[in-house]
C-alpha cells in the first residue's frame, strides 16, 4: 500500500513538473536565434511588450521580418509601436494546423491590445480567416477591414503555450496610432485629469517636477496618489515635514526606470527610487496577486489603480495611498486634524536635532508593518475578462530583482506548489 502510494506521488510530481516546464517561455531569447526578426525583437524589449508576452501561459506572437518592421516604425512613436506589437499578440494558441482548420473558416480572437482598456468595442480583436489558395489572412475587427497580413510560416511552437508565427505585414486600423506621448504631454495636466490634483500641486510647489522631467529621457515611472489618498485616516501630517523631507517623499514616488504594470510584476527585491541613497534606503518592492499590483514600502502597501501614461521610457500610474517610506515615518508626524486633509505646505524651518526621545510610531502604521518574507513563487499572469483561459498563478509576497533576460516570468513554478498540495492530500488520504 505504502509503495503504491509512493509510486503514485512520484508519477504525479513528474507529470506536473512536465506541465510546468512548458509554461515558462522567453520570447526575446527565442527570437535571438533568428536574425531576420532582430528589429522586431529589439522593439519588444524597448517597449516591454516582451514582459506582457512572457507573463501569459497561452499566447501566439505574430512576428515581422526586419523589412516589414522598418516600414511600420518609420514614423511612429514608441507608444504607437507598442500598441502595434500588442495587436500582433494573440491570447490563444494558433499553430499552422489550427489556422487552416478554423470553424466556419473564420475566427475573431482577443489580443494584448484589448487588455489595455484603450480599445473601443472589438478593436482589440483580430479577425483570422482562411482565404483562397490556402492562405490565412489577419485583419482588424473593423467592419470591412482588408486582410493586410497573411500567414507566412511557423517559427516556433511550444504546444499549447507559445506559438511564434511570421506574418507578411502589420495589422492596423484608423485610430490605433493616437497614443499620448510623454514629450507632448503636460505632466501636471495629466495628473489633474486623473484625479491627482493635490499631488500635482505638491510636485510643482516643491520643484520636484523638474527632477521628474530631467529623468524622463532615460526612464521614469511615477506613482501618483489620488486626491482621496491625502484624506486617508491616519495619514501623517505632511505640513510638519521640512522642505527637504517633502522633496524626499515626492522623489520616493518615482523610479529611475521605465516600468509599465506588466513589467512591475517581474521585478523582484528592492527597487531603487529617485530618493534612494544606497544600502536599500528609500527602496520600494512589488507585491503581485493575479492582475493586482501593489507597491510595498515596508510600512504599508498601495495598489496600482490605473495607468495614466505609458510611453516608453515613461510610465505614470495612480496609486490608492501615499507611499510612506520607513526612513521618514517610523516616528510618524501626528495625523492632520480629523476631517482635514494633510496640508500641502511643508515647514520652512529645518527639523530640530533630536534632543528628546522620538515620538512613538503611529499605531496604524506600526500595526501594518510586517517582516518581509522571500518569495519563491513567480508573479502571476494577467487575466483579462475577455482573454482565453490563461492559467495565472498567485504571488502575495514582495518580489526580488529579476534575473531572467528582459524580465521573463517563470509562470510554470506555480505548478510545483500545486504538486506539493496534491501530494499532501493524497498522502493524507492513505493514512
Image (spheres, rainbow, N blue to C red):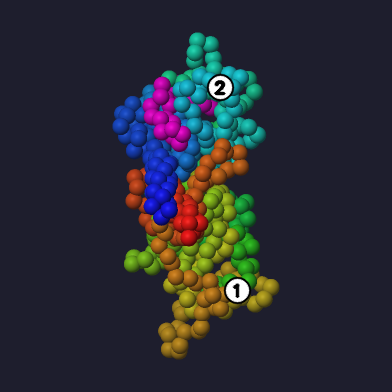
| Residue on which the image places disc 1 | 234
Q: Which mark is residue 204?
A: none
Mark 1 packing: few (<14 Cα in 10 Å), some, or many (20+)? some
Residue 251: % across, % down: 45, 62
Q: Nearer the viewer, residue 138 or 133?
A: 133
- Identify the residue at image location x=53%, y=27%: 172
Q: Residue farthest to the top?
A: 133
Residue 390 at least partly seen: yes
Please say if 48 is above or below 187.
Answer: above
| Residue on which the image places disc 2 | 102
Q: Residue farthest to the right?
A: 339
**Is residue 154 rendered magenta in the image?**
yes
Which range is magenta?
153-173
Q: Residue farthest to the front?
A: 1
Q: Nearer the viewer, residue 268 or 200?
A: 268
**Callout 2: SS:** loop
Asked if residue 227 lies left or right of residue 160, the reply is right
Amino acid at each position: 500500500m505504502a509503495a503504491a502510494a509512493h509510486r503514485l506521488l512520484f508519477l504525479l510530481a513528474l507529470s506536473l513538473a512536465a506541465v510546468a516546464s512548458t509554461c515558462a517561455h522567453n520570447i526575446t531569447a527565442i527570437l535571438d536565434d533568428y536574425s531576420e526578426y532582430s528589429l522586431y525583437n529589439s522593439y519588444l524589449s524597448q517597449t516591454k511588450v516582451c514582459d506582457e508576452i512572457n507573463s501569459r501561459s497561452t499566447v501566439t506572437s505574430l512576428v515581422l521580418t526586419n523589412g516589414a518592421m522598418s516600414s511600420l516604425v518609420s514614423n511612429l512613436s514608441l507608444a504607437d509601436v507598442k500598441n502595434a506589437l500588442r495587436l500582433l499578440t494573440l491570447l490563444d494558441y494558433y499553430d499552422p494546423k489550427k489556422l487552416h482548420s478554423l470553424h466556419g473558416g473564420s475566427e475573431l480572437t482577443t489580443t494584448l491590445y484589448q487588455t489595455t482598456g484603450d480599445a473601443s468595442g472589438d478593436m482589440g480583436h483580430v479577425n483570422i480567416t482562411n482565404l483562397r489558395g490556402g492562405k490565412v489572412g489577419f485583419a482588424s475587427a473593423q467592419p470591412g477591414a482588408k486582410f493586410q497580413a497573411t500567414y507566412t510560416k511557423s517559427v516556433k511552437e511550444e504546444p499549447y503555450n507559445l506559438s511564434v508565427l511570421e506574418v507578411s505585414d502589420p495589422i492596423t486600423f484608423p485610430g490605433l496610432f493616437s497614443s499620448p506621448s510623454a514629450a507632448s504631454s503636460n505632466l501636471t495636466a495629466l495628473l489633474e485629469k486623473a484625479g491627482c490634483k493635490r499631488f500635482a500641486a505638491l510636485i510643482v510647489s516643491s520643484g520636484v517636477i523638474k527632477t521628474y522631467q530631467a529623468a524622463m529621457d532615460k526612464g521614469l515611472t511615477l506613482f501618483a496618489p489620488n486626491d482621496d489618498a491625502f484624506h486617508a485616516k491616519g495619514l501623517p501630517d505632511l505640513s510638519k515635514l521640512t522642505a527637504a523631507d517633502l522633496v524626499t517623499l515626492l522623489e520616493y514616488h518615482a523610479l529611475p526606470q521605465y516600468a509599465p504594470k506588466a513589467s512591475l510584476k517581474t521585478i523582484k527585491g528592492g527597487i531603487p527610487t529617485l530618493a534612494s541613497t544606497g544600502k536599500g534606503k528609500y527602496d520600494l518592492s512589488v507585491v503581485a496577486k493575479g492582475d493586482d499590483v501593489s507597491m510595498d514600502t515596508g510600512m504599508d502597501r498601495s495598489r496600482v489603480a490605473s495607468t495614466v501614461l505609458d510611453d516608453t521610457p515613461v510610465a505614470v500610474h495612480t496609486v490608492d495611498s501615499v507611499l510612506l517610506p520607513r526612513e521618514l515615518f517610523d516616528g510618524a508626524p501626528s495625523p492632520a486634524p480629523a476631517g482635514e486633509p494633510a496640508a500641502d505646505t511643508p515647514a520652512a524651518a529645518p527639523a530640530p536635532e533630536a534632543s528628546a526621545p522620538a515620538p512613538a510610531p503611529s499605531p496604524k502604521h506600526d500595526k501594518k508593518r510586517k517582516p518581509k518574507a522571500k518569495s519563491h513563487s513567480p508573479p502571476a499572469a494577467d487575466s483579462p475578462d475577455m482573454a482565453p483561459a490563461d492559467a495565472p498563478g498567485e504571488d502575495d509576497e514582495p518580489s526580488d530583482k529579476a534575473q531572467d533576460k528582459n524580465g521573463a516570468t517563470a509562470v510554470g513554478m506555480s505548478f510545483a506548489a500545486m504538486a506539493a498540495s496534491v501530494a499532501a492530500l493524497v498522502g493524507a488520504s492513505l493514512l
